[in-house]
């Protein structure tokens, strides 16, 4: 099956959004997602779902969007010049979860599909996505579990897939102006269109369905650990790194804003509370310093 089946991809993304929201509501046990359906004047629309003030999740957003346009935005043509002069459709599910307890890591996942068309020429299409983890207080068993799930889901598609996409994730989620990783990585891939549509779609489904088994066991282990103001203040400080990356380096944010996307949905990834502190340095040999020395480094966790 080498001809992209757009409706099949859309059906999977909608189902995935439902599945993830249902599971997050169950583990939170207090708050539920509010859904905001929207239409885009240029074409398409989406379902934005946000959970706030939960007992486990301070804020969680799980968005589906399917947008169309007559020309690709500058951020896309700079990355793929052959897209100039083509109309496009872009769809996907994107989520960011900001837990309340500082011992529970922030997580992000995204699966997406692009197709660009021009009369008289074959369509250009590709999949992208992945998931990554951003702890505030690191636990080796959590990092190992996260990466083992990622490696296991990659195995049926080739033994070289996990190391390739792990390295890509490490390189992509790197805050260049801080010279530090955003977190402990995971998987990241883009421009996936070989060897065929069916294989690429199957891999993307595996990534999307692998997020919950990777993340929820970590949430269960850490959500009831006692915490106080020290941990909270460090969490809020580290969240500032998340904001900096998303606004300065993230290609998805740039694409969404430059393509006239819905700003509220695009910036849903921002944490509800955050703080900056000039010249902060953690105390030596503290749990906070351990985040930098043990976890915010490139490492083979499996």
Image (cartoon, grey):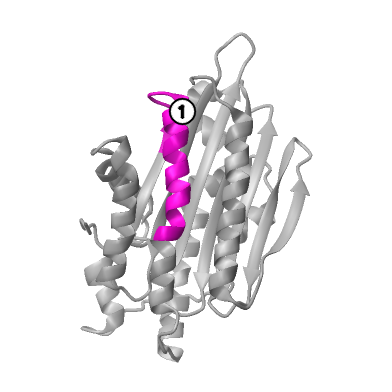
Whether residue 129 is situated above or below residue 115 in the rendered picture: below
Foreground of the two, 142 or 70: 142
Most frequent secondary structure within the magenta stretch: helix
Q: Is residue 207 left or right of residue 94?
A: left
The residue lying furthest to the top in this view is: 120
Whether residue 57 is situated above or below residue 20 in the rendered picture: below
Foreground of the two, 13 or 37: 13
Q: Secondary structure at mark 1?
A: helix
Q: Is residue 171 visible?
A: no
* x and y, in percent, of residue 170 in the image: 31, 52
Whether residue 175 is situated above or below residue 232 in the rendered picture: above
Name the residue beneath numbered marker 1.
198
Magenta stretch contains residue 178: no
Q: Is residue 293 visible?
A: yes
- Tell me the magenta residue range: 190-213
How many labels were placed on the picture?
1
Foreground of the two, 130 or 284: 130
* x and y, in percent, of residue 248 in the image: 48, 54
Whether residue 46 is situated above or below residue 32 in the rendered picture: above
**Label 1 crowd bin: few (<14), some (14–19), many (20+), radius 10 Å:** some
Q: Residue at x 40, y 78 (%)?
A: 222
Magenta stretch contains residue 203: yes
């Amino acid at each position: 099956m080498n001809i992209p089946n757009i409706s099949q991809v859309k059906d999977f993304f909608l189902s995935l959004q439902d599945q993830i929201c249902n599971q997050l509501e169950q583990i939170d046990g207090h708050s539920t997602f509010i859904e905001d359906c929207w239409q885009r004047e240029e074409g398409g629309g989406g379902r934005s779902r946000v959970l706030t003030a939960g007992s486990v999740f301070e804020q969680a957003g799980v968005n589906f969007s399917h947008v169309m346009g007559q020309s690709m935005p500058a951020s896309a043509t700079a990355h793929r010049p052959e897209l100039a002069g083509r109309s496009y459709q872009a769809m996907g599910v994107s989520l960011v979860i900001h837990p309340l307890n500082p011992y529970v890591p922030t997580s992000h996942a995204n699966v997406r599909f692009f197709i660009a068309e021009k009369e008289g020429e074959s369509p250009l299409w590709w999949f992208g996505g992945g998931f990554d983890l951003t702890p505030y207080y690191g636990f080796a068993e959590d990092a190992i579990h996260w990466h083992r799930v990622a490696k296991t889901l990659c195995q049926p598609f080739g033994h070289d897939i996990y190391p390739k996409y792990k390295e890509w994730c490490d390189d992509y989620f790197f805050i260049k102006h801080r010279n530090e990783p955003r977190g402990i990585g995971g998987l990241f891939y883009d421009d996936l269109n070989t060897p065929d549509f069916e294989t690429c779609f199957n891999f993307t489904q595996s990534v999307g369905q692998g997020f919950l088994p990777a993340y929820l066991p970590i949430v269960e282990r850490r959500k009831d650990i006692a915490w106080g103001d020290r941990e909270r203040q460090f969490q809020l400080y580290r969240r500032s790194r998340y904001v900096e990356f998303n606004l300065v380096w993230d290609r998805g944010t740039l694409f969404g804003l430059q393509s006239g996307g819905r700003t509220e949905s695009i910036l849903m990834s921002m944490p509800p509370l955050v703080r900056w502190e000039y010249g902060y340095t953690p105390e030596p040999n503290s749990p906070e310093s351990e985040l930098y020395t043990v976890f915010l480094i490139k490492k083979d966790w499996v």
